[in-house]
Image (tube, rainbow, N blue to C red):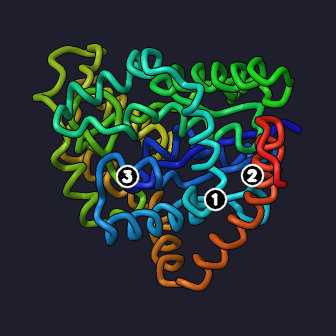
Amino acid sequence: MDIVVSGIRSTGKLHLGNYFGALKNFIKMQHENKCYFFIADYHSLTTHPTPENLHGSVKQVLAEYLACGLDPEVATLYIQSDLPEIPELYLLLNMNAYLGELERCTSFKEKIRKHPNNVNAGLLTYPTLMAADIIIHRAHKVPVGKDQEQHLEMTRTFANRFNRLYNVEYFPEPVAYNFGEELVKIPGLDGSGKMGKSEGNAIYLSDDPETIRKKVMKAVSDSGPTEPNQPKPEAIQNLFTIMKVVSTPDTYAYFDDKYNTCQIRYGDLKKQLAEDITRFTDPFREKIEAILADNKYLSDVAEMGAEKARQSASQTIKEVREIIGFRRF
């Protein structure tokens, strides 16, 4: 059974794109592999959140993933900062990470371009912290998006470098997890691109019905087709793409036919789409609210996850320290 490690952003709520992207596969994956899912609150410190925002965001994210189906009894679900072994391994990896390779990291160059007044060491050494997150459990596979592929390659570099430096075959070389099927990409409501928090075009699983209705009714559309079977512009195709995953096949076929025969009324389509999204997200929203109100349950889940994760992490650190040469007199 493969050991799989995946980080979870500690900021931002889950939206439809998250759910139909990786999360549905996480839920399936946890029953097929030995999975470690962690909320990456150390990583968020590069943006300097307030203590209140940091704690509140972690609580929200934990509740949402539980509501969506991650099972703490099956997988190991924990908060990154609950494992002191992670920053220790991060420090040890940094001793053999070189400035040039860290500065060449695409995400670092992008961050300093966008935020030139916040070029901190945490941004520079993000790849070594990510590597520590992964190899602390000696993982074989990591689910990563395109934007994280370079970091995974650097993780392999750090793992192999450790093995060479100390003449051991200790850390496996982790590879990208192949879900076995193409992920569903949910577009945003602004007429282009994918759904995302930073783009401001997302529908969140915790949105109430009125919020969903307002967002959908403001979605970008056009004046309608001028001839039968006319190709759909991107903004219109986006609405149909979302409808395909939340509505019934009959509903989708009805509005597709209306478009192809130049009888489409976007107001009707948006009203139906908002109703179908609400029907889809209501169970998640209700579960999220119930879990957020149960502080004891959240505390128990976090404590159990930390205990399970430490069993693996503490063994790794013990063996790494011995390999490096740390000994007690």
Mark number for residue 83? Answer: 1
Residue labelled with disc 3: 45
Residue 14 x %, y %: 43, 53
Horizontal and vertical percent position of residue 31: 80, 49
- In what element is the residue under mark 3? helix
Left or right of residue 119, residue 32 in this image:
right
Quadrant where the C terminus lies?
bottom right
Q: Mark 2 points at which residue?
A: 313
Amino acid type, callout 3:
Leu
Who is closer to the viewer here, 310 or 9? 310
Image: 49 above or below 232: below
The disc, 3 or 2, on the residue closer to the chain's N-terminal end is 3
CA gap between label 1 and label 3 equals 16 Å
Quadrant in which residue 221 is drawn: top left
Dot 1 or dot 2: first in sequence order is 1
Q: Do the residues labelled 1 and 2 touch (CB within 8 Å)?
A: yes
Quick one: which residue is furthest to the left in this view?
Answer: 223
Q: How crowded is mark 3: few (under 14 residues within 10 Å), some or many (20 or more)?
A: few
Q: In this view, does 260 lie to the left or right of 43?
A: left
Q: Note whether 255 is above or below 7 in the view shown.
A: above
SS category of the residue bearing label 1: loop
Question: Depth check: 16 or 78 in front?
Answer: 78
Which image quadrant is residue 147 in? Answer: top left
Residue at the image position 10 percent from the left and 29 percent from the top: 223
Q: Which residue is drawn at 78% across and 65% down?
A: 73
Spatial CA distance of label 3 from label 2 is 22 Å
State whether residue 33 appears in this view: no
